Amino acid sequence: MKLTFAAEDAVIGVVCGLLIIGFAGKWFSLKLPDFTYVLAFGIFIIFILIDIMHEFSDLARHFGFILFSILHNAADLIVSLTFISHFSGWNIPYITLNLVPYLKDAMAVYYVGLFLLIGNAIWLVIFPFAE
């Protein structure tokens, strides 16, 4: 068990995905102040790190599932750091220089939002089968 329930990071990932899809404005428009996105992704990073620590403590059970979960968390972490750098203006080595420029394209932002939404929703569906 992590903080509140086992798949809390996936729920926050779905919320962050919806925020980014709204920011992109393809399905619906949701333009919030930049600090809101920084706060949401900062919270998401905390839960990603807790999940990664939890996964490393449980490597003996469902090794393939755990490995795939760690890889997905790494991708979520990189996406989160990219959006934090984009919305806050903070210079994060490698991320700001190489990944933030992709966020200039609204379709790229939309697809990243879809990745967060769909990827974390899938984890919500398959997580009970791993327990």
Image (tube, rainbow, N blue to C red):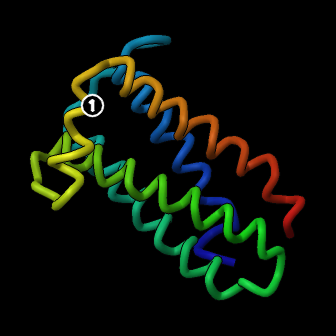
Lateral position of residue 21 relative to residue 106, left or right: right
Percent coordinates x, y for residue 32 in the rendering: 27, 28
- Identify the residue at horizontal 73%, vertical 49% (top origin): 124
Above or below for 5 versus 41: below
Left or right: 77 as drawn, with respect to 127: left
What is the quadrant of residue 54 in the picture? bottom right
Left or right of 17? Residue 37 is: left
Task: Name the spot of residue 7 as percent of width and height, x first.
Answer: 67, 60
Neighbor class of circle 1 (other Cα within 10 Å; few <14, some 14-19, many 20+) is some
**In the rendered view of the protein, which quadrant contains the N terminus?**
bottom right
- Disc 1 element: helix
**Image coords of residue 93 (percent x, y):** 16, 61
Q: Which corner quadrant holds the C terminus?
A: bottom right
Please give the count of numbered marks on the rendered protein.
Answer: 1
Q: Which residue is mark 1?
A: 103
Q: Is residue 93 above or below residue 26?
A: below
Image coordinates for residue 123, horizontal then vertical, percent:
71, 51
Q: Residue at x 72, y 84 (%)?
A: 58
Near-viewer residue (35 or 126): 126
Question: Where is 68 relative to 34, above or below?
Answer: below
Q: Amino acid at mark 1?
A: Leu
- Quadrant of the image occupied by residue 2: bottom right
Location of residue 56 (image quadrant): bottom right
Q: Nearer the viewer, residue 67 or 26?
A: 67
Residue at image coords 55%, 74%: 52
Residue drawn at point x = 26 percent, y = 43 percent: 99
Q: Nearer the viewer, residue 3 or 74?
A: 74
